[in-house]
């Protein structure tokens, strides 16, 4: 029997996220773990993944993990060193398939908060704000969100609706004026992979990570999560993926070093 | 057009387009004038207390840190800053007490390095007020509207969210499609500071790599201070005019400051100095640490050359060049491995 590789949950999340990205598609990548997952996808199953960074990096062959979504690594051997106007306009036109984000809080419709914990005017914790998240979540065809899952983060009501998911349910995005047929697609946490029900637009469980039970996922969700009759188990990271993550993408442990 | 919704954020740095045209006619010269000066002069002349300030580049990439240090040294106060992906630039200005109001797309964070202790503390203690929220594309397009000489620009971002509720945008029914549209007001910063790869003495500037928002931001600016790695002859500009991204008539001051983006990244020249960033992030955890940092690196030095010696001199700068070219491994002392 093949020896099972040792991995951290953050590495598992990176691998699971990487596999949701398809080759020959475009992805607008947010800061942190999403960059790692997109670069991993490009270095494994999706060599023709068009990685796009909001500051203007278009189609780079990212050599290693950039610290910023605007640093020189984000347009290394790129197709074009463009601008934020260029990238965001491309997203508004419909050229960007995936928006890849992190978040501090999420609700059952995939609306996310990266602005404040507590009230806006007297915040308990002030977070960076939208950045390009609102733009990615508004304009890309499908949004993928990578975040930690617990009852403080997966909540019935988020403290601030920074970036639109399905707002308050089916049809709400279009009614608000957001581009048609867009919205959240996957949420990847340390516990499993979640999607959204086509009819109700509510979050549903798709797969649990190895050694995680459906009960654990439910216990770490602050809202009523849809549980389909069939829930699969997420594939383990491979030795190859782990090696690329540790030696090529983030040897300094800037993201993967966090436990 | 019917206004369907209106954000409650404060409308900042907006101008009536005709008033702005008159201001341009009176204040911006169209003649080729040598605009070279030193940083002390540029900041004293063009940065006023209470200004709305925006920085070119991307928060810790191609930022005019040399100008930021000078703003701190001259103790400019009550600045409102565009948090248009503001990272190390705003963190230092907030920590030093120069900025007390913000329009926030992205601030109070250091991207992969985590949250910014000093500016988070300031906002959580109420010393810095967030007057309006916006998205990155939103800010970018506010500058674009200004660069076009328009009062606003229609977009499809921010709709349906609290980001819009706390912004200065308005939602209207599009007279063409009938769908709701987000109108973003133009933004004309009082002062923009921008670091470029090279320019001539008049301010005709070239930038290598991504433009971020600088094409629009330079045009939206009322006053524009350019710091540059290198001054080149006008003839070189004229040999390759397609490389000019900022023409001279937009520029008010030209200051030569090699390594002027340090500790930020300068694409193709030097990578960010993570050792220095780690020192800042550690010290800025306490007000005493901020004081200690500013004493050592800002108040305690007379020139940017002296600062560069202090951060490690030629040896450090050579390492950052090698790092930019992927020739040496990156060490990030703030990483928790």
Image (tube, grey):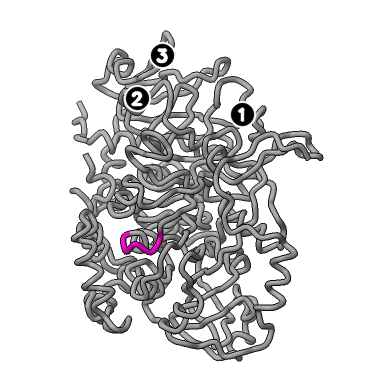
Q: Is residue B332 above or below residue B104?
A: below
Question: Closer to us: mark 1 or mark 2?
Answer: 1
Q: Is residue A153 above or below residue B323?
A: above
Q: Provide the residue span drawn in magenta.
A: B95-99
Q: Per the image, is B80 magenta?
A: no
Which chain is disc 2 placed on?
A
Q: CA distance from mark 3 to mark 2?
A: 16 Å
Residue B83 location (% of width, % of height): 46, 55
Disc marking residue A192: 2
Q: Picture coordinates of residue A149 (x, y %)?
A: 32, 27
Q: Disc number at residue A224?
A: 3
Q: Check chain identity for marks 3 and 2: say if they share one.
A: yes
Badge 3 and badge 1 both on one subunit: yes
Extreme residue in the top direction: A229
Chain on which label 3 sits: A
The residue at 58%/78% (across/down) is: B251
x then y, percent, for residue A194: 42, 24
- Of the numbered discs 3 and 1, the one sitting upstream in the chain is 1
Q: Is residue A56 left or right of residue B256?
A: right
Determine which quarter of the picture holds residue A13.
top left
Residue density around tag 3, few if under 14, some if 14–19, many if 20 or more, within 10 Å: some
Q: Nearer the viewer, mark 3 or mark 2?
A: 3
Q: Nearer the viewer, residue A28 or B193?
A: B193
Query: Is A241 on the left or on the right of B49, as rendered?
Result: left
Residue B88 relative to residue A257: left or right: right
Residue occupying image coordinates x 25% and y 48%: A246
| Pointer 1 chain | A
């Amino acid at each position: 029997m093949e020896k099972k590789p040792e991995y951290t949950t953050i590495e598992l999340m990176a691998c699971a996220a990487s596999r949701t990205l398809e080759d020959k598609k475009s992805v607008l990548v947010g800061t942190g773990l999403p960059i790692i997952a997109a670069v991993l996808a490009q270095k494994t199953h999706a060599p023709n993944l068009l990685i796009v960074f909001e500051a203007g990096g278009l189609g780079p062959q990212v050599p290693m993990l950039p610290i910023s979504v605007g640093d020189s690594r984000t347009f290394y051997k790129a197709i074009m060193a463009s601008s934020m106007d260029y990238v965001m306009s491309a997203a508004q036109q419909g050229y960007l398939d995936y928006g890849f984000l992190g978040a501090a809080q999420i609700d059952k419709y995939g609306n996310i908060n990266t602005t404040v914990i507590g009230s806006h005017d007297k915040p308990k914790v002030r977070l960076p704000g939208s950045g390009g998240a609102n733009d990615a979540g508004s304009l890309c065809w499908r949004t993928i969100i990578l975040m930690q899952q617990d009852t403080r983060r997966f909540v019935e009501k988020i403290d601030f609706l920074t970036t639109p998911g399905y707002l308050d349910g089916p049809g709400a995005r279009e009614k608000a004026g957001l581009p048609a047929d867009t919205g959240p697609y996957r949420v990847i946490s340390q516990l499993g992979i979640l999607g959204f029900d086509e009819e109700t637009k509510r979050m549903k469980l798709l797969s649990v990570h190895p050694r995680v039970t459906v009960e654990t996922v439910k216990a770490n969700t602050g809202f009523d999560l849809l549980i389909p009759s069939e829930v699969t188990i997420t594939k383990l990271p491979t030795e190859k993926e782990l090696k690329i993550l540790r030696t090529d993408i983030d040897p300094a442990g800037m993201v993967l070093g966090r436990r | 057009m019917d206004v369907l919704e209106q954000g409650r954020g404060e409308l900042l740095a907006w101008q009536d387009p005709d008033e702005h045209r008159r201001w341009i006619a009176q204040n911006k010269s169209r003649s080729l004038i040598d605009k070279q000066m030193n940083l002390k002069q540029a900041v004293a002349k063009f940065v006023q207390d209470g200004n709305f300030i925006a920085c070119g580049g991307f928060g810790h990439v191609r930022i005019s840190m040399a100008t930021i240090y000078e703003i701190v040294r001259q103790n400019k106060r009550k600045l409102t800053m565009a948090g248009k992906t503001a990272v190390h630039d705003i963190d230092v200005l907030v920590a030093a007490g120069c900025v007390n109001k913000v329009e926030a797309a992205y601030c109070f964070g250091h991207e992969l390095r985590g949250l910014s202790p000093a500016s988070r503390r300031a906002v959580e203690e109420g010393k810095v007020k967030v007057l309006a929220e916006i998205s990155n594309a939103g800010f970018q397009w506010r500058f674009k509207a200004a660069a076009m000489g328009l009062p606003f620009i229609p977009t499809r971002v921010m709709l349906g969210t609290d980001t819009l509720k706390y912004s200065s945008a308005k939602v209207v029914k599009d007279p063409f499609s009938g769908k709701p549209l987000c109108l973003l007001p133009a933004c004309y910063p009082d002062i923009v500071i921008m670091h470029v790869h090279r320019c001539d003495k008049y301010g005709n500037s070239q930038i290598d790599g991504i433009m971020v928002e600088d094409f629009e931001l330079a045009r939206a600016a009322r006053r524009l201070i350019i710091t540059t790695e290198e001054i080149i002859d006008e003839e070189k500009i004229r040999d390759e005019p397609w490389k000019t991204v900022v023409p001279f008539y937009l520029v008010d001051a030209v200051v030569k400051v090699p390594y002027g983006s340090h500790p930020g990244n300068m694409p193709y020249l030097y990578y960010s100095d993570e050792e220095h960033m780690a020192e800042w992030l550690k010290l800025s955890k306490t007000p005493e640490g901020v004081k200690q940092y500013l004493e050592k690196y800002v108040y305690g030095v007379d020139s940017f050359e002296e600062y560069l010696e202090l951060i490690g001199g030629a040896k450090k700068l050579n390492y950052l060049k090698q790092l930019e070219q992927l020739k040496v491994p990156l060490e990030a002392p703030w990483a928790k491995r």
